[in-house]
Image (cartoon, grey):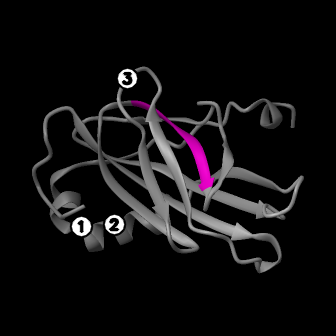
Protein backbone atom coordinates (compact mmCIF):
# COMPACT_ATOMS: atom_id res chain seq x y z
CA UNK A 1 0.00 0.00 0.00
CA UNK A 2 1.10 3.58 -0.39
CA UNK A 3 2.27 5.70 2.52
CA UNK A 4 -0.60 8.00 3.51
CA UNK A 5 -1.80 10.04 6.46
CA UNK A 6 -5.47 9.52 5.51
CA UNK A 7 -7.38 6.26 5.86
CA UNK A 8 -10.98 5.73 4.75
CA UNK A 9 -13.53 5.73 7.61
CA UNK A 10 -13.85 2.45 9.55
CA UNK A 11 -10.58 1.17 8.06
CA UNK A 12 -7.46 -0.03 9.82
CA UNK A 13 -4.05 -1.27 8.75
CA UNK A 14 -3.09 -4.92 9.14
CA UNK A 15 0.62 -5.57 9.73
CA UNK A 16 1.92 -9.13 9.78
CA UNK A 17 4.96 -11.05 8.67
CA UNK A 18 4.45 -14.47 7.12
CA UNK A 19 7.56 -16.63 7.28
CA UNK A 20 7.48 -19.68 5.01
CA UNK A 21 9.92 -22.41 5.99
CA UNK A 22 10.31 -25.69 4.14
CA UNK A 23 11.83 -28.58 6.12
CA UNK A 24 15.03 -29.65 4.36
CA UNK A 25 14.89 -26.47 2.23
CA UNK A 26 12.76 -28.32 -0.33
CA UNK A 27 11.68 -25.78 -2.97
CA UNK A 28 7.98 -25.04 -2.79
CA UNK A 29 5.58 -23.73 -5.44
CA UNK A 30 4.08 -20.23 -5.29
CA UNK A 31 2.27 -19.90 -1.98
CA UNK A 32 -0.62 -17.74 -0.82
CA UNK A 33 -2.83 -17.48 2.24
CA UNK A 34 -6.19 -15.81 2.73
CA UNK A 35 -7.61 -13.60 5.45
CA UNK A 36 -11.36 -13.35 5.76
CA UNK A 37 -13.80 -11.50 7.98
CA UNK A 38 -15.20 -13.91 10.57
CA UNK A 39 -18.71 -12.40 10.63
CA UNK A 40 -19.44 -10.95 7.23
CA UNK A 41 -20.19 -11.66 3.64
CA UNK A 42 -17.13 -9.96 2.17
CA UNK A 43 -14.72 -11.76 -0.13
CA UNK A 44 -11.51 -13.12 1.38
CA UNK A 45 -8.27 -11.23 0.73
CA UNK A 46 -5.53 -13.33 -0.87
CA UNK A 47 -1.98 -12.57 0.26
CA UNK A 48 0.74 -13.85 -2.06
CA UNK A 49 3.89 -15.12 -0.35
CA UNK A 50 6.69 -14.82 -2.94
CA UNK A 51 9.57 -14.84 -0.46
CA UNK A 52 10.59 -16.63 2.71
CA UNK A 53 9.81 -13.47 4.75
CA UNK A 54 6.68 -11.62 3.61
CA UNK A 55 5.91 -8.36 5.39
CA UNK A 56 2.21 -7.61 4.89
CA UNK A 57 0.93 -4.02 5.27
CA UNK A 58 -2.62 -3.63 3.92
CA UNK A 59 -5.81 -1.66 4.56
CA UNK A 60 -8.79 -3.68 5.82
CA UNK A 61 -12.26 -2.66 6.99
CA UNK A 62 -12.45 -2.83 10.80
CA UNK A 63 -13.59 -6.14 12.25
CA UNK A 64 -12.57 -9.61 13.35
CA UNK A 65 -10.68 -11.62 10.74
CA UNK A 66 -9.05 -15.04 10.55
CA UNK A 67 -6.26 -16.61 8.56
CA UNK A 68 -8.11 -19.12 6.41
CA UNK A 69 -6.89 -21.02 3.34
CA UNK A 70 -3.32 -21.88 2.41
CA UNK A 71 -2.57 -22.62 -1.25
CA UNK A 72 0.67 -24.09 -2.61
CA UNK A 73 0.77 -23.89 -6.40
CA UNK A 74 -2.04 -26.06 -7.72
CA UNK A 75 -2.40 -27.83 -4.37
CA UNK A 76 -4.78 -26.56 -1.73
CA UNK A 77 -2.62 -26.75 1.37
CA UNK A 78 -5.43 -26.67 3.88
CA UNK A 79 -7.61 -24.50 6.02
CA UNK A 80 -7.56 -23.19 9.59
CA UNK A 81 -11.39 -23.34 9.68
CA UNK A 82 -11.55 -19.76 11.00
CA UNK A 83 -9.84 -20.75 14.26
CA UNK A 84 -7.00 -18.22 14.03
CA UNK A 85 -8.77 -14.86 14.58
CA UNK A 86 -7.34 -11.37 14.94
CA UNK A 87 -8.87 -7.89 15.28
CA UNK A 88 -8.46 -4.86 13.04
CA UNK A 89 -9.36 -1.61 14.83
CA UNK A 90 -10.32 1.39 12.70
CA UNK A 91 -7.86 4.26 12.48
CA UNK A 92 -5.00 2.17 13.87
CA UNK A 93 -2.00 0.20 12.68
CA UNK A 94 -2.80 -3.32 13.90
CA UNK A 95 0.13 -5.71 14.27
CA UNK A 96 -1.44 -9.19 14.24
CA UNK A 97 1.76 -11.20 14.67
CA UNK A 98 4.20 -13.24 12.70
CA UNK A 99 2.63 -16.28 11.10
CA UNK A 100 5.26 -19.00 10.92
CA UNK A 101 4.35 -21.52 8.25
CA UNK A 102 6.32 -24.78 8.25
CA UNK A 103 6.03 -27.08 5.22
CA UNK A 104 7.13 -30.68 5.77
CA UNK A 105 7.11 -33.06 2.79
CA UNK A 106 4.10 -31.11 1.50
CA UNK A 107 4.73 -32.43 -2.02
CA UNK A 108 4.28 -36.08 -0.93
CA UNK A 109 1.19 -37.97 0.21
CA UNK A 110 0.90 -37.53 3.96
CA UNK A 111 2.97 -34.34 3.87
CA UNK A 112 2.05 -31.66 6.33
CA UNK A 113 2.14 -28.00 7.17
CA UNK A 114 1.85 -26.18 10.46
CA UNK A 115 1.09 -22.63 11.57
CA UNK A 116 2.48 -20.93 14.64
CA UNK A 117 2.10 -17.35 15.86
CA UNK A 118 4.96 -15.27 17.27
CA UNK A 119 5.21 -11.70 18.54
CA UNK A 120 8.03 -9.97 16.67
CA UNK A 121 6.41 -6.51 16.92
CA UNK A 122 9.57 -4.95 18.38
CA UNK A 123 11.40 -5.95 15.20
CA UNK A 124 8.74 -5.25 12.55
CA UNK A 125 7.03 -2.07 13.77
CA UNK A 126 10.17 0.11 13.44
CA UNK A 127 10.55 -1.21 9.88
CA UNK A 128 6.93 -0.30 9.12
CA UNK A 129 7.56 3.19 10.57
CA UNK A 130 10.63 3.56 8.33
CA UNK A 131 8.81 2.59 5.12
CA UNK A 132 5.48 4.23 6.02
CA UNK A 133 6.45 7.42 7.89
CA UNK A 134 3.24 9.36 7.14
CA UNK A 135 1.04 6.46 8.18
CA UNK A 136 3.07 5.80 11.32
CA UNK A 137 3.00 9.45 12.34
CA UNK A 138 -0.76 9.82 11.77
CA UNK A 139 -2.06 6.62 13.40
CA UNK A 140 -1.37 4.79 16.67
CA UNK A 141 -0.04 1.25 16.66
CA UNK A 142 -1.69 -1.58 18.59
CA UNK A 143 -0.72 -5.22 18.99
CA UNK A 144 -3.60 -7.67 18.42
CA UNK A 145 -1.85 -11.01 18.15
CA UNK A 146 -3.65 -13.73 16.26
CA UNK A 147 -5.29 -16.17 18.65
CA UNK A 148 -4.91 -19.87 17.96
CA UNK A 149 -8.10 -21.83 18.70
CA UNK A 150 -7.29 -24.90 16.62
CA UNK A 151 -8.06 -28.13 18.50
CA UNK A 152 -4.56 -29.58 18.08
CA UNK A 153 -3.02 -26.54 19.78
CA UNK A 154 -5.42 -26.55 22.72
CA UNK A 155 -4.37 -30.08 23.72
CA UNK A 156 -0.73 -29.07 24.35
How far apart are labels 2 and 3 at the CA level? 30 Å
The spot of residue 139 in percent (x, y) is: 21, 50
Mark 1 — residue? 132
**Magenta segment range?**
64-71
The spot of residue 150 in percent (x, y) is: 72, 33
SS of the residue under disc 2: helix
SS of the residue under disc 1: loop
Mark found first going from the N terminus, 1 or 3: 3
Location of the C terminus (image quadrant): top right
Mark 2 — residue? 128
Q: Looking at the image, which residue is at 19% across and 58% down?
A: 135
Image quarter for residue 40?
top left
Q: Looking at the image, which residue is at 29% across and 67% down?
A: 129
Confirm whether the magenta stretch covers residue 66.
Answer: yes
Are there few (<14), some (14-19), or many (20+) residues within 10 Å of tag 3?
Answer: few
Q: In the rendering, which numbered label is found on residue 41?
A: 3
In this view, the mark in front (2 or 3): 3
How far apart are labels 1 and 3 at the CA level? 30 Å
Q: Is residue 13 left or right of residue 84?
A: left
How far apart are labels 1 and 2 at the CA level? 6 Å
Q: Nearer the viewer, residue 60 or 132?
A: 60
Q: Looking at the image, which residue is at 24% across and 67% down?
A: 132
Are there few (<14), some (14-19), or many (20+) residues within 10 Å of tag 2?
Answer: some
Say if mark 1 contacts mark 3, CB within 8 Å: no
Amino acid sequence: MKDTATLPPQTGIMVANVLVWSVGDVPYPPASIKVDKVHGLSAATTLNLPRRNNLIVIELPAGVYSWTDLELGSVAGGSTSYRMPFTIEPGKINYVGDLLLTLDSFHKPGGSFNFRIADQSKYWLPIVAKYYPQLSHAYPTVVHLTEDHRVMNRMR
